[in-house]
Image (cartoon, rainbow, N blue to C red):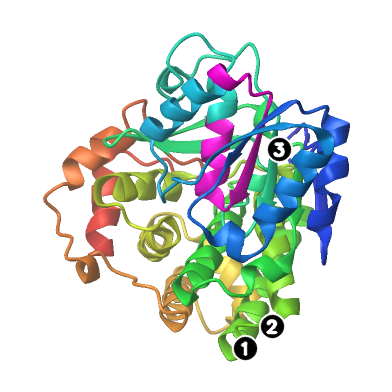
Amino acid sequence: MIGFEYYNPARIVFGEDSENKLTRLLKEAGVKSLLLVYSGDFIKTLGIYSVIETAVSKLGIKLSENGNVVPNPSIDLVRELVDCGKKDGVDFVLAVGGGSSIDTAKAVALGIPYEGDVWDFFEKGISPKEVLPVGVIATTASSGSEVSNAAILSNGEWKLGFEDDRMIPKFAIMNPKYTVNLPTFQTFAGIADVLSHLLERYFSDEKYSDTTDYLIEGAIKALEINTERLLKNPHDINARGEVLWLAAVAHGGFLDAGRSADWGSHRIEHELSAQYNITHGEGMAIVMVAWTKYIAKKKPWRAALLAERVFGIDTHNYSVEERAFILSEKLKEFFVKIGLKVSLSSFGIDNRNFEIMAQRATKNGTVGHYLPLSAKEIIEILELAI
């Protein structure tokens, strides 16, 4: 187990009627001017908007809002919201939705106190002097951004991330009922995203990390069980709650303790979604199948361990490499079962842009920690994904 420092101050407010605690949370935060960031009219259909209106009215908070967030959020909208936030004297950003809304809110919280272009943080990695506080009302179970210190944005060519502990939301309201009527595709693409976060952390080269090994394996098993429940009954509120909580568990930092996560697969997928605007969860399904197939030959031991412990693949009947290949097939079967594409060809994508994507991904050197990948190796994985 390697040394670590764990920090996550996010307050989780989970369960039925948890949204009714919003007034108290905003009062405790001393909010005077709030910017609400979301995507479309669903927050009114779900009744969330009225809860927010009541809270800000009761507390005398100035409310600004924007509902134009889209998947794979753009720096252009962030710049627009930063300008509006500065004019309105915004001192708190509230995101309602999933990863796209939350990441947009975090970027706006970076940009409002900053005199330059907010893209500087993502492109140049500069350290902010100040970050506005962010709160979240989660309506999807996917990215885990409601408890993470990271945001991902695209400028149309590059899809880049930025991390700072001050971006961890001050609170995350998580009511499973808000996820019950999600479209089928969004539900299962979200589950693929949750699984990808667990897998990225599992693929560590640290051999003495039993505590987090078993925690991650247990979380994967819990995700599998509750996915089966949702396939049978999409309105199963208990399964919805389990998956919503698993999204936070997977990305809240606790499972990083004592190990070094890989993240190479995410870097590859970011190029895919930047180039082709693929939904992140489905993109991760494609990449994880190809990546695990690739490492089965290059460095199979972690994949073989997972195949044995989670999928029950017998160590006596199969070699380490064979078990690693079986894991790739098990992942493929899982993603197909939940209705996700598992190949680039199913999107009509060929290899014409692989070189440029691989070069972008490795601009600052190899990507991934369990198995560092060069541009050449990324192209080989993308070829497997066709």
Residue segment shown in magenta: 86-107
Q: Position of residue 252 (x, y in %)?
A: 70, 46
| 60 over 110 or under it: above or below | below
Q: Magenta stretch containing residue 95, yes or no?
A: yes
Residue 126 lies, in percent from the top left, at: 51, 14
Q: Say whether residue 207 is magenta.
A: no
Q: Residue furthest left?
A: 352
Q: Are marks 3 and 2 in contact (CB under 8 Å)?
A: no
| Callout 2 amino acid | Asp
287 or 308, nearer to the observer? 287
Judge from the rendering whether residue 241 lies leftward or rightward of residue 361; answer left or right.
right
Q: Is residue 273 above or below residue 283?
A: above
Q: Residues within 10 Å of mark 3 (few under 14, many from 20)?
A: many
| Contact check, label 1 and label 2, Cβ < 8 Å | yes
Is residue 320 in sight in this rendering?
Answer: no
Report helix, strand or loop for mark 2. loop
Q: Earlier in the sequence, mark 3 or mark 1?
A: 3
Name the residue located 75 percent from the left edge and 32 percent from the top edge.
61
Q: Earlier in the sequence, mark 3 or mark 2?
A: 3
Q: Which mark is residue 233?
A: 1
Give the CA separation, mark 3 to mark 2.
Answer: 28 Å
Name which residue type carries label 3.
Answer: Pro
